[in-house]
Structures are given as C-alpha cells and as structure tokens.
Amino acid sequence: MHRRPIVSALVSLSLILGVLPPLACVATAAGKPGYPDRITWAGHSWQVKSSTSRVGPGPNYFSPSTDNVWVDGTGRLHLKITLRNGRWNCAEVIGAESFGYGTYSFTLASAVDALDPNVVLGLFTWSDKGAFNHREIDVEFARWGDAGGPTNAQYVVQPSSLAGHLHRFTQPAAAAPTFHGFTWRAGTIDFASADLSAWSHAWSYVGADVPKPGGENVRLNLWLFGGAAPTDGREVEVVVERFSFAP
C-alpha cells in the first residue's frame, strides 16, 4: 500500500535540496566482480559496467569507454549512449559500497523531461542476490517506448508489477538542475523530487515488503528500452552533478 508522505518526505526533500548537511556514514564493501574499470566521483569509487554481448537492462551492450562514462573537470558525472561501428553502447556505474537505510540524493545537471522515448535513466539501488526483489528501489525517467505517453518519470519499489509499487509522474519541461532521491527506512520509503522553481513532487510507499538492507549498492544507468535505438537516431548524454548519502 502507499500513502502521501508527511514528515519523512519533508526531511528527504530538504536533504535533496541541500538544506540539511550530509552526515558521516559507515559503509560496507559491495560492487560486482568482473568489472575492472573504475572511476572516482562524488567522493566514492564506482565500477563501470561492461559487456561483450547484450545484457540487462534492455538487453543492451554496456561500454566502459570514456566515450560513455567520464567525470569532467568540475566533478560532474557524464553518462552517454553512443553509436560505434553500428552498435549502440549504453552506460552504467556501480557503487563500491553498501549504505543501507538512509537518504539517497541525486542532482541532475541535464534536463531529463524530453529524453527520447526509447531512453531510460535510472537512479537506484540493486543487489545481485534475489532477496527482496534484489533490493531494487528506483527513480527512473522514461516513456518506455511510448512517445505520446502523458508521464515521463516514476518511483518504484520492486516488483513494479504489484499494485501500489509504482508511481508515475511528470518532470516539467526544461527543468534543470533537478533534485531527486528517497529516504529508505524500515517499512517505509519516501521519494521526493524538486527543481529550483516552485515545482516539487513526492510519494511514499509503506508495507511489510519494504526491502531490508543487505549488500545492495547504488547504481546510475542510461540505457535503451528493449535494446531499441533512439527513435531520432541520435546519441544521448546525461550529466549528473552530485550524489550524496546521509544515514
């Protein structure tokens, strides 16, 4: 079931907007074996996903090339979908720590309201172990192939197929920077988004099936729904200003 957020979401939104300072935290090692490429961003180490065949999500090819994933001179993370030698390559970074309960905040420097209908941007937690639906908690920007869809974003507590686990909303046009995140507590997940104007949005999920922490890590990815090329045939780039965590 779900409810409109009250106190926790206000705290989450304050953290996302930077009103409250992030607190010190103790994190355990996580990450995924087999991805040797790494970057340092937002004060953390991240593995860069790579594949030589199509893998999920999508399925797609994921490239560790600096054409797809890099950190610029101002410390911003760039994720880019590129076309190289007739193959579309997507981008994903995987945090090397497991934080558990707390507030996860992301600042996007790019406008994400008008992503190509086949493009998906994910800000989420994930565990390779299957318990609690891989402990997947998502903020996603996507139209899932539907160019005429009335919404362009969603909050999800997986599995999304269950009633009340998915909340669709609309990120306003040309709004950047934007602030997104969630506060994960026992039995409750409060999501919130905002920009520098008066716009904000929030939603909460409450239930006995809220995941318990255990080996999950933070991931950011930019990929193609169903592995289909962008409808306009153009490469796609998203810039992420900041990630932070507060227990």
Image (cartoon, rainbow, N blue to C red):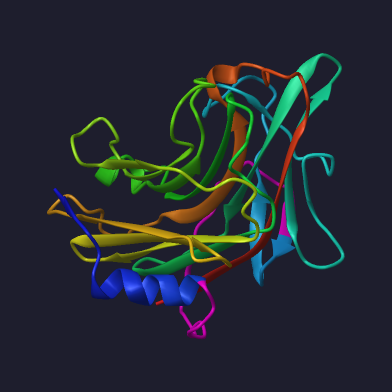
Considering only vertical position in the picture, is 242 above or below 228?
below
Q: Is residue 29 visible?
A: no
Which x, y percent locates residue 167?
A: 31, 43
Name the residue at 49% across, 62% down.
Answer: 194
The answer to whether residue 43 is magenta is no
Considering only vertical position in the picture, is 171 above or below 52?
below
Q: Is residue 138 left or right of residue 18?
A: left
Q: Quadrant of residue 81?
A: top right
Which x, y percent locates residue 214?
A: 33, 58
Q: Is residue 75 left or right of residue 107?
A: right
Name the residue at 47% across, 56% down.
Answer: 217
Q: Is residue 91 visible?
A: yes
The span shown in magenta is 17-39
Q: Quadrant of residue 41?
A: bottom right
Name the residue at 39% across, 71% down.
Answer: 12
Viewer-nearest residue: 191 or 47 = 191
Which x, y percent locates residue 106?
A: 55, 62
Which x, y percent locates residue 184?
A: 32, 64
Q: Quadrant of residue 196?
A: bottom right
Most frequent secondary structure within the magenta stretch: loop
The answer to whether residue 21 is magenta is yes
- Locate the C terminus and report the quarter of the image it occupies: bottom left
Considering only vertical position in the picture, is 238 above or below 176?
above
